[in-house]
Amino acid sequence: MSPEPEPGVVDPRRDHHPDTFYSAYALFKAKWVHQIRPRGRLLEIGCGEGHFLRAATSLGYDVAGVEVDAARVRRVREALGVEVRCSSFEDLQWQEASFDVVYNCDLLSHFANPVDALRKMRALLAPGGILAIEAGTLGGIRPFWYRCIGQVGFPQHRWLYSETSLRHLLTRAGLSILKMQHFGLAPAVALHQSRVLTARAIGSLRRTSTTRNTTHASRAIPNRRQRLDTTYEILEQFFRYRLGAITPRIGPATWLIAAYPAPGVMA
């Protein structure tokens, strides 16, 4: 990101993704990792509410986590009974760590120095271990897509990668790619646009009609809206991962990536 945001603007404890972004397809992602490295110790960096750790536990992994938010750390510890360290990844000190899988979701766009972050992740791996990453490619696409997306999470998202720059980043960090799976975001973007247009149409109808408001109705509307939002968020994840898996490589995308330390690279 250039220029860098002012100190304090980027708060690592703030998450702009809804909880369903992590919960709805946690098991899907854990199974993807399981196909490549089916057992061992697994560390999730930025474990949030522990959805992926819970899914990984169900597949037989011995799990641990790192999370910057103290309240989330407490909830995951209580719910899963596993070790979770409260720290930003940049400040993490875990000299004795040795994991068969180090996993993180949507973090590479947030680190001030993603190359250093990847090298630090690489150092946490046991011999034969893999780094499993979910990362988006919102760079190198036509301006049309940005108008459809509406926003890219600036300044929380410091970096917008293309597939080429993402591969180059991993190489610079001393990692070799074992597997990459593409999930096109065109279906999810189309769903987002349909929701925006529908909301505008409904708003226009409401402004031109007279509605009798009651106390009961005013209380019911937020609950109904919350249920609709949750339903939409789950549907969006279906569009992202199920339809995205068969979408041509056009426009923005998200990737599941498995990588290992390049031969001859020292931890």
Image (cartoon, helix red, strand yellow):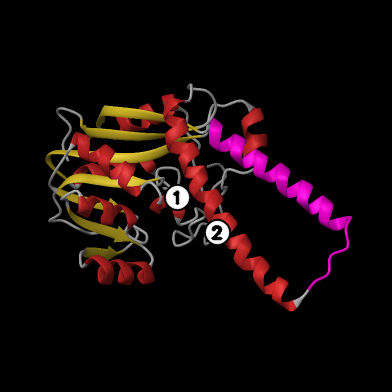
Q: Secondary structure at mark 2?
A: loop
The foreground one among 3 and 59 is: 59
Q: Position of residue 53 (x, y in %)?
A: 27, 55
Q: What is the quadrant of residue 76 in the picture?
A: bottom left
Query: Which residue is label 1 attached to?
Result: 21
Q: Position of residue 230 (x, y in %)?
A: 53, 56
- Name the residue type under label 1: Phe
Is there any visible trace of residue 120 in the rendered image? no
The foreground one among 75 and 103 is: 75
Q: Position of residue 221 (x, y in %)?
A: 67, 66
Q: Residue at x 39, y 53 (%)?
A: 23
Task: Name, please, the residue furthest toward the left.
Answer: 127
Q: Position of residue 209 (x, y in %)?
A: 88, 58
Q: How many marks?
A: 2
Q: Secondary structure at mark 1?
A: helix
Q: Residue at x 25, y 39 (%)?
A: 33
Tell me if label 1 and label 2 are in contact, CB under 8 Å: no
User: What span is colored magenta in the figure?
Assistant: 186-213
Q: State which mark lies toward you, 1 or 2.
A: 1
Q: Per the image, is 209 magenta?
A: yes
Query: Which residue is label 2 attached to?
Result: 9
- Name the residue type under label 2: Val
Number of other residues with Cα within 10 Å of mark 1, as a class: few under 14, some 14 to 19, many 20 or more? some
Q: Main secondary structure of the magenta part?
A: helix
